[in-house]
Structures are given as C-alpha cells and as structure tokens.
Image (cartoon, rainbow, N blue to C red):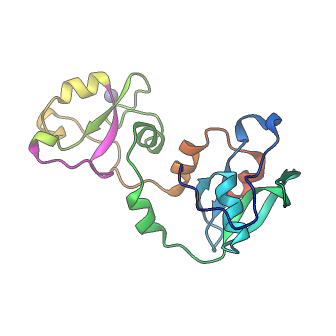
Amino acid sequence: MATVSPAPVGSAPLLEHQRRGRERGRVLVLNATFEPINVCTVRRAVVLLLKDKAEVIEHAEWDLHSATLTIQRPMVIRLVTYVRIPRDTHRRKITRRAVFARDGWACQYCGSRSSLTVDHVIPKSKGGQSSWDNIVASCAPCNRRKGDALPRQVGMRLLRKPRTPSPHVFIHVASPTIPAAWQQYLAA
Ligand SMILES: [Zn+2]
C-alpha cells in the first residue's frame, strides 16, 4: 500500500478535500471482469488511470486538483487488463485481522467471539506451516486447551476447513468503512 509508482511527467501530487473523513484515500479496484480484488490509495488509482491501465467506474461528486490537472475523485476503478487472482491472493499477508475477518470473528473450535487469538492447527513444533490453511481464529480458552497438540488428540474439531480468504476479506480489512459507492460491487 505504501508503494506509489512514479508520477507521470507534469502531474503534481493530487490534493484531496480534507473533509471527507475516513473514506479519504481509498479506492476500490475491480478486475477486468468487475470482480473486486483490492483497495488502493487515490494516488495509486490516479497513476493507473493516467497510464490507461484502469478506467473510472464510480467517482465522487468532487474533484481532485493539482497544478496541471483536475479530475473527479475516483471511488471505484476497473483494471483494463485481467489480473490473475489466485496468484495474487497467495501472496497476501497473513495478519491477525485478516484471519479473524475470514473466520467471522469467531473461534473456529467453539464459536466464541471473545478473547480471540490466532492458532496453528498443526502446531509449529509438529511441522505446521504459517499458511492460510493452517491458521485459524481461536478463543484463548480453546487455544490453552489445545496446547501443543493436534486438535483430534484433545478431542477438538474445527468448525470448517481453513483456506485462503476471498479478496472481499482483504477489502474489508483494508477499509473497515465501506463507502456507499462500493457496495454494489461487493454484494456478489
Ligand atoms: Zn473457542
């Protein structure tokens, strides 16, 4: 998110209105197929637009200004070229927030929603990987009960099999507040 491509020649940094609150600086990125794949900064979106790598699907009612350019603030953009998602999602970082969001903020052993921790299903000490299919949300009591054992060794069962989350999960993690302009693209 922090990386910004070099700005095209002649475009000064774009300044946004300050009064837009928390949605400021976030743009929903759709694949060429209109499938939502990511969230990026306004600056990154503008670079993609100016390079003709993306088109505007939804924009705000207000403009971005630079010394040489005025454009409507993009809210949703669509990549012109299809991006393969499976490869992309695999690279996505495993964070506590993303694990909890994927698991519906519920312990994957008992369903509790309080004192969530992250658990390696196959413990690291037994060769378990830090991968999406081996990490789940677990409440602290379940995590303690499981200890350094495999779930079945202590009579515990996962509510569902963990897997790599859909791009929707990362979009919600990156932008806890979903702007209204995004909603129809995230509904599917
Ligand atoms: Zn639990």
Residue placed furthest toward the bottom: 81
- Could you say which is closer to the camera, residue 178 or residue 160? 178
Ligand 1 found in image quarter: top left
Q: Is residue 62 left or right of residue 23?
A: right
**Residue 155: quarter of image:** top left
Query: In which quadrant is the C terminus drawn?
Result: bottom right
- Could you say which is closer to the camera, residue 10 or residue 146? 10
Q: Is residue 187 visible?
A: no
Q: Which residue is depicted at the point 73% across and 69% down? A: 50
Residue 178: x and y in percent read: 68, 43
Q: Which residue is depicted at the point 73% across and 42% down? A: 24
**Residue 55: quarter of image:** bottom right
- Could you say which is closer to the camera, residue 181 or residue 136? 181
Residue 114's place in the image compared with 94, above or below, is above
Q: Which residue is depicted at the point 35% across and 47% down? A: 160
Residue 52: x and y in percent read: 70, 75
- Could you say which is closer to the camera, residue 42 or residue 151? 42
Residue 174: x and y in percent read: 56, 44
Q: Is residue 103 visible?
A: yes
Q: Is residue 43 left or right of residue 60?
A: left
Residue 96's place in the image compared with 115, above or below, is below
Residue 61: x and y in percent read: 89, 51
Q: Which residue is depicted at the point 66% across and 73% down? A: 53
59 falls in the magenta region: no
Which stretch is magenta? 126-139
130 falls in the magenta region: yes
